């Protein structure tokens, strides 16, 4: 009996607004596969119609991804080729796709990326902020307390930070940023690649002033400059005293070193060496 050759799962990036941003390879793959699994079949069919793509379409969104991923991988193991697309951009980045990919890998199915648009990279490329090193956090929490906690934990991050935020919560988020991170440079990218694309650059206070009399609409990508290098020079004795104070709070050596390094901006290795010289437990 002839062994059945497994199919391939193609993870296909699609436009985030302007339909012209699809790649030639993505069009070819979407035409050739046996099935297209889509986060939202209605939105995907708009794209398929524009490029005369007639491949069968099925739905795979967050709530059903775990269950339907197994069925799709079953088809892949029988030799079917399947493409997965999210609503817009690259699947898996704050979109479904992760479970499908991991299930395919677990069962030995080949997974092929078909790269293209990503809102994160597109926004960074025109932001004017450093992008040689950055961190993507996805969507900020919807509730104010959790959002503030998330931003507080990012306060000392030195890389450029990228968030997604809803237009309804943008003003509150900018207020939190001004309070928790100061007036550091940031960029609000709105409706990237679409008709009303806009980049607002400045401090949180500047951008709040720009938006004061406006109703905010559209997809928002928020980019925040990293924390500046510390300007205060800490001597070994100052760091040792901080470690002593931390010791009184019954923290482990690892936690004391981590907190002192975060508070001062000093390299963790240096703080640890001072802790060892001080014979802290």
Image: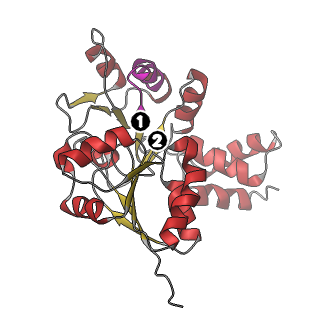
Q: Is the Cβ of the residue at disc 1 closer than 8 Å to that at disc 2? A: yes
Q: Which residues are magenta?
A: 165-177
Image point (49%, 82%), residue name: 4
Image point (55%, 28%), residue name: 147
Tell me the residue that label 1 is attached to: 164
**Nearer-N-terminus badge (1/2):** 2
SS class, disc 1: strand
Q: In the rendered view, would you say 182 is above or below 255?
A: above
In the picture as drawn, the residue positioned furthest to the bottom comes out as 1
Where residue 254 sits in the image (x, y, percent)? 72, 54
Q: Residues within 10 Å of mark 1 (few under 14, many from 20)?
A: many
Q: Main secondary structure of the magenta part?
A: helix
Please check the rendered image and state whether residue 28 is part of the magenta-colored stretch, yes or no.
no
The answer to whether one can see residue 125 in this image is no
In the picture as drawn, the residue positioned furthest to the top comes out as 213
Q: Residues within 10 Å of mark 2 (few under 14, many from 20)?
A: some
Q: In the rendered view, would you say 120 is above or below 184?
A: below
Tell me the residue that label 2 is attached to: 138
Image point (58%, 60%), residue name: 70
The answer to whether one can see residue 232 in this image is yes
In the picture as drawn, the residue positioned furthest to the front comes out as 1
- Of residue 94 and residue 33, the one placed in the foreground of this image is 33
Query: Hey, which quadrant is residue 189 in on the image?
Result: top left
Please check the rendered image and state whether residue 171 is part of the magenta-colored stretch, yes or no.
yes
Where residue 167 sits in the image (x, y, percent)? 38, 23
């Amino acid at each position: 009996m002839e062994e059945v050759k497994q199919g391939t799962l193609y993870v296909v990036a699609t436009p985030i607004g302007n339909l012209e941003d699809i790649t030639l390879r993505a069009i070819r793959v979407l035409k050739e596969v046996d099935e297209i699994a889509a986060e939202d079949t209605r939105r995907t069919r708009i794209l398929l119609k524009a490029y005369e793509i007639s491949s069968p379409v099925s739905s795979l969104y967050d709530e059903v991804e775990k269950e339907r991923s197994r069925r799709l991988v079953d088809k892949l193991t029988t030799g079917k080729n399947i493409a997965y697309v999210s609503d817009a951009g690259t699947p898996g980045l704050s979109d479904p796709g992760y479970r499908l990919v991991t299930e395919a890998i677990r069962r030995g199915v080949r997974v092929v990326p078909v790269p293209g648009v990503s809102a994160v990279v597109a926004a960074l490329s025109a932001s004017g902020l450093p992008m040689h090193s950055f961190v993507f956090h996805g969507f900020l929490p919807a509730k104010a307390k959790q959002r503030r906690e998330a931003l507080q934990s990012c306060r000392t991050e030195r890389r450029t930070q990228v968030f997604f935020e809803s237009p309804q919560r943008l003003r509150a988020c900018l207020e939190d940023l001004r309070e928790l991170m100061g007036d550091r440079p940031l960029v609000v990218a709105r409706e990237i690649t679409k008709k009303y694309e806009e980049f607002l650059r400045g401090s949180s206070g500047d951008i709040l002033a720009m938006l004061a009399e406006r109703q905010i609409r559209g997809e928002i990508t928020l980019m925040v400059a990293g924390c500046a290098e510390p300007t205060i020079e800490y001597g070994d004795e100052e760091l040792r005293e901080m470690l002593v104070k931390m010791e009184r709070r019954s923290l482990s050596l690892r936690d004391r070193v981590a907190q002192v390094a975060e508070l001062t901006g000093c390299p963790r290795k240096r703080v640890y060496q001072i802790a060892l010289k001080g014979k802290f437990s």
